Image (cartoon, rainbow, N blue to C red):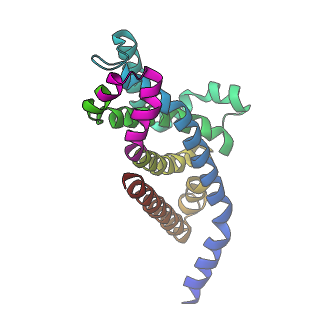
Amino acid sequence: MEVLIESIKKVALLIPVPLFETLYMVLASTLFSVILGLPLGIITAISEEGHIWERRGLNRILNGLVNITRSFPFIILMIAVFPLTKLIVGKRIGTTAAIVPLTIAAIPFVARLVETAIKEISPGIIEAALSMGADIKQIIFRVLIPEALPSIASGITLTIINLIGYSAMAGAIGGGGLGNLAIRYGYQGFQEDVMIGTVIVLILMVQIIQSIGSRIYNKLVK
């Protein structure tokens, strides 16, 4: 029992700073990915054949970019964008530096979720808006986004959960956070209690975020 109590105390002392770093990375990259991914998803959706702003060439280019970016394993992507990370934040590794590849990895994910949410909207609703003289801007902001909002909220929840996993991988190459704690103390330091504690915290984070996301989704649906 004493050994268990000591392990809990040790983990409790080690967790706070890495937990804050993980939350910082995840929330910042979520914000930036939504800011950039939302318009990308909307444009991709409305530019496809038969939609309100048909642009086949642009649609093929955007789909290609999204597919290419999504095909990169995150660790490879993180290394590949080191020069861009250095240019933006002044360094290649660290908690703040990890936000750049995390955002780049999440943008196409958000864009695809937004695109799918918009495509699920009944064409009849769009046709009704067009028949009343609504222009493209009005349809986007007064029809498409409000109708797709529950699905978009659900997609953002899924994005945050994925980013938690990505941030843990970022810790393997100097990104900080809970992943770095698990690698340094749990794996390299052979401290199983730290590894187990880190996993428990990550599981709790996912459960809390999923619970909050589900409540927001249900309220938006109602």
For residue 145, above or below residue 165: above
For residue 25, above or below residue 93: below
For residue 154, above or below residue 131: below
> Hey, which quadrant is residue 129 in on the image?
top left
Which quarter of the rendered picture does the N terminus lie within? bottom right
For residue 45, above or below residue 159: above
Among all residues in the image, which is located at the extreme right?
Answer: 90
Q: Residue at x 39, y 23 (%)?
A: 44
* 161 in magenta: no
Which quarter of the rendered picture does the C terminus lie within? bottom left
152 and 190: which one is in front?
152
Residue 221 position, x and y percent, is 36, 52
> Hey, which quadrant is residue 4 in on the image?
bottom right
Q: Residue at x 44, y 37 (%)?
A: 110
Count of marks placed on residues: 0
60 and 193: which one is in front?
60
Question: Is residue 135 shown to the viewer in this render?
Answer: yes
Among all residues in the image, which is located at the extreme bottom?
Answer: 1
- Over which residues does the magenta segment extend? 128-152
Residue 48 position, x and y percent, is 32, 19
Residue 131 position, x and y percent, is 32, 23
Q: Main secondary structure of the magenta part?
A: helix
Relative placement, left or right, of 60 versus 79 is left
Question: Is residue 94 shown to the viewer in this render?
Answer: no
Q: Residue at x 48, y 64 (%)?
A: 208
Residue 77 position, x and y percent, is 50, 31
* 139 in magenta: yes
Among all residues in the image, which is located at the extreme front?
Answer: 132
